[in-house]
Image: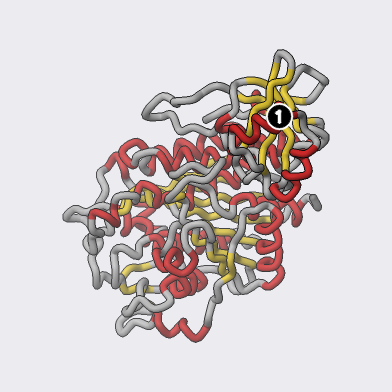
């Protein structure tokens, strides 16, 4: 994983190039105060302080950077500069780095597992807010962890590799890992087993659990969908739909990253991380449309679509989470195409029956520039889950309200007295933005972490 610490250093007055952030509406006034040479340079470079543009002004033996920024408080105000400035050390002119630090770090993120970075020259930013520095570095590292995991090809990231990631996390924070697989999985977590039973032995399904923290502290659970590749099963996806299914473990990537943030911050909680890890493969052993599946909770589910497998594995994991009687459960899942149709790739739908939690997550999304949008757990659609032969179906006919009915399915596996939120994340950025390259990405991660910090540490 990329080491961001060298890119954000304490400001001790060391030599550095100056960056001036200039809102577009102040450009004309700023230009009139500059020298003839600077005005000519701005004209020659067609610089007008538009967002994500900059100009370099010679200054003795060095340079000064002037950059356009529509919102200097945005986490992404410096991201384009971090991608494109010459190698060196920089400081903001007359301002503290603040939220800008995150974009500076993530603007230099590169996924290098399969090829060398085209540009690896480090750009260092100086900050006077040393206390905030470690937190920003952790947030950048957590985001990079999600990106790295989602960007990794499914041939290199199966259930065993997800387990290895959880083991690394456990060793770093002295946590306990419990992994259930084989006959025990078939007996105790039948839906997880059913979805993953067609995979090869090397990619066998499992439930990964991590326990951390003082048992006397408030209990919370973080659950992440870990479908390491999704063919759609016997309801096979078309090639276009299967192309990006390496990202179907994006919920697990978010859960791992959020758990790491919680433990690194030493929040006073008893953490329970759960990742049902499977490959939804095709073989003679694959589960079939029309099969009636048992569940850990004791309900029966008529499988009407093998491509609606994520909610199945999450149902068993949510049941297990509820058995520990947590006061809060958060789940992340790349669950439905319907969520993307409704809200697009950048805006994860939030589902919860708890008004206080909804308000906290929405406010945190705004504060962190990591937005979510609430959709209803509409009781009127619960009848869509009816089955003629079992307690429920996993995928209603017709396709209406697909994101909502998937969330309603999950709700049946959450204890009624437990606060719960479901985040249907895309985990993928179809086109790049400064600091947010095309490919795997984290959504609602910073918002969720802010809520947990606010609830359990008062920060």
Q: Is residue 435 left or right of residue 90?
A: left
- How are the colours assigned in the image? secondary structure
Residue situated in front as seen by the camera: 304 or 323: 304
Residue 190 drawn above or below residue 300: above
Q: Is residue 204 left or right of residue 175?
A: left
Residue 198 drawn above or below residue 339: above
Where residue 168 appears, x then y in whole percent?
52, 33
Residue at point 45% right, 50% down? 428
Quadrant position of residue 170: top right
Q: Could you say whether the residue bearing mark 1 is in a helix, strand or loop?
A: helix
Where residue 90 appears, x then y in whole percent?
70, 26
Tally the marks: 1
Mark 1 burial class by Cα count in 10 Å: few <14, some 14-19, many 20+? some
Residue 84 drawn above or below residue 395: above
Quadrant position of residue 102: top right
Where residue 11 appears, x then y in whole percent?
79, 25
Q: Which residue is mark 1?
A: 38
Residue at point 41% right, 58% down? 188
Residue at point 43% right, 76% down? 401
Residue at point 53% right, 43% down? 436
Q: Is residue 436 visible?
A: yes
Q: Is residue 263 visible?
A: no
Residue 238 drawn above or below residue 169: below
Where residue 389 appears, x then y in whole percent?
30, 82
- Toward the top, the furthest residue is 61
Residue situated in front as seen by the camera: 428 or 394: 428
- Toward the left, the furthest residue is 284
């Amino acid at each position: 994983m990329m080491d961001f610490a060298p890119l954000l250093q304490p400001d001790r007055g060391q030599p550095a190039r100056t960056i001036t952030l200039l809102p577009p509406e102040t450009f004309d006034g700023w230009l009139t105060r500059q020298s003839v040479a600077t005005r000519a340079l701005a004209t020659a470079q067609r610089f007008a302080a538009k967002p994500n543009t900059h100009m370099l002004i010679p200054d003795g033996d060095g340079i000064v950077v002037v950059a356009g920024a529509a919102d200097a408080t945005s986490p992404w105000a410096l991201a384009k500069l971090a991608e494109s400035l010459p190698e060196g050390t920089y400081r903001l002119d007359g301002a503290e780095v603040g939220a800008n630090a995150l974009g500076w770090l993530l603007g230099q993120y590169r996924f290098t597992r399969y090829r060398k970075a085209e540009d690896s020259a480090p750009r260092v930013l100086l900050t006077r807010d040393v206390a905030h520095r470690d937190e920003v570095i952790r947030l950048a590292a957590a985001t990079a962890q999600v990106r790295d995991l989602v960007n990794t090809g499914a041939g290199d990231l199966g259930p065993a590799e997800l387990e290895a990631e959880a083991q690394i996390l456990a060793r770093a924070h002295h946590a306990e890992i419990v992994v259930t697989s084989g006959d025990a999985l078939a007996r105790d977590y039948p839906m997880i087993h059913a979805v993953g039973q067609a995979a090869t032995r090397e990619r066998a399904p499992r439930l990964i659990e991590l326990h951390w923290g003082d048992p006397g502290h408030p209990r919370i659970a973080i659950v992440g969908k870990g479908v390491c590749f999704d063919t759609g099963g016997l309801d096979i996806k078309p090639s276009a739909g299967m192309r990006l299914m390496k990202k179907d473990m994006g919920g697990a990537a978010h859960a791992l990253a959020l758990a790491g943030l919680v433990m690194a911050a030493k929040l006073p909680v008893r953490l329970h991380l759960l990742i049902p890890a499977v490959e939804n493969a095709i073989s003679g052993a694959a589960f079939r449309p029309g099969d009636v599946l048992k569940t850990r909770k004791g309900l029966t589910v008529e499988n009407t679509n093998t491509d609606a497998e994520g909610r199945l594995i999450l149902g068993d994991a949510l049941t297990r989470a509820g058995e520990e009687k947590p006061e809060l459960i958060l789940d992340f899942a790349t669950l439905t195409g319907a969520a993307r149709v409704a809200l697009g790739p950048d805006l994860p739908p939030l589902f919860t029956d708890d008004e206080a939690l909804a308000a906290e997550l929405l406010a945190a999304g705004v504060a962190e520039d990591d937005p979510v949008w609430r959709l209803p757990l509409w009781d009127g659609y619960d009848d869509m889950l009816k089955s003629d032969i079992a307690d429920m179906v996993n995928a209603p006919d017709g396709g209406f309200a697909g994101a909502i009915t998937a969330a309603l399915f999950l709700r049946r596996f959450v204890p009624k007295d437990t606060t719960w939120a479901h985040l249907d994340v895309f985990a993928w950025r179809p086109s790049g933005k400064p600091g947010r390259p095309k490919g795997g990405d984290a959504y609602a991660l910073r918002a969720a972490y802010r809520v947990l910090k606010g609830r359990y540490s008062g920060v």
